[in-house]
Image (spheres, rainbow, N blue to C red):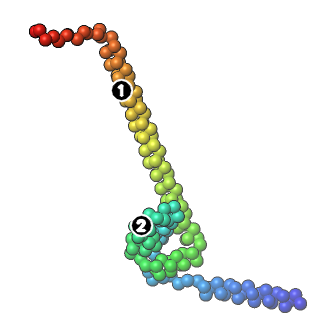
Amino acid sequence: MIRKKLLVLFCIVLGVSSCYQYNKPEKPKNLIPKEQMVNILLDLKLIGAVTGRDKEVLDSAKVVPESYVYKKYNIDSAQFANSNAYYTYYMKEYAEIYEKVKDSLSKLKTYYTDILDRELKEKRKADSLKAAKRELEALELDAEIIDTEEEEPRLIDAVSDNE
């Protein structure tokens, strides 16, 4: 009885391991290089973020995100699919690719956050300068009013018909 169970288990393990070899994808002739794959996946992630947030912008510009990326990198959907399938089979390589994508996204986030912070500081500075200028103009206006109040009133010369 135990021998039968071991034999069945052995056959299952042998079958699964032998099938694993047959599912191994062949290296495509037009395999996209890793660095280009990083750039393609990065662009797809960025476009995916825009699509999720501002789909109307892409729709109004009549941009199909995947087609845009394929055209940009001079590839087609089959080449991308084959390269993607090849890299996903080799998880270590795919993990390296996605780690680079993640690092690039992180650097982009930092870069644009810094720009946004600088613009916000410049806007605050410009706003405070405008406020200071308005305050100065108001003070000058008040000073003019005070100066005109201090002048002695003058009498208006009468106009007579006799002159």
Question: Residue 124: percent from the left, percent from the top?
Answer: 44, 38
* Disc sitting over residue 137 in the figure: 1
Between 163 and 139, the one lying in front of the other is 163
Taking 104 as reference, is 64 above or below it? Answer: below
User: In the picture shown, does residue 93 fall above or below 141?
Assistant: below
State left or right for residue 12 relative to residue 86: right
Residue type marked 1 = Glu
Question: Where 68 sits versus 163, above or below?
Answer: below
Q: Where is residue 115 in the image (x, y as percent from the top left)?
A: 44, 48
Q: Residue at x 10, y 9 (%)?
A: 163
Q: Identify residue type, mark 2.
A: Ser
Q: Residue at x 42, y 36 (%)?
A: 127
Judge left or right: residue 107 versus residue 20.
left
Q: In this view, does 21 lie to the left or right of 122?
A: right
Q: Can residue 148 be seen in this view?
A: yes
- Name the residue: 79% across, 86% down: 9
The image's mark for residue 64 is: none
Residue nearer the viewer, 162 or 84: 162
> What secondary structure is marked by label 1?
helix
Mark number displayed over residue 60: 2
Between 121 and 59, the one nearer to me in the picture? 59
Crowd class of label 1 (few under 14; some 14 to 19; many from 20; radius 10 Å) = few
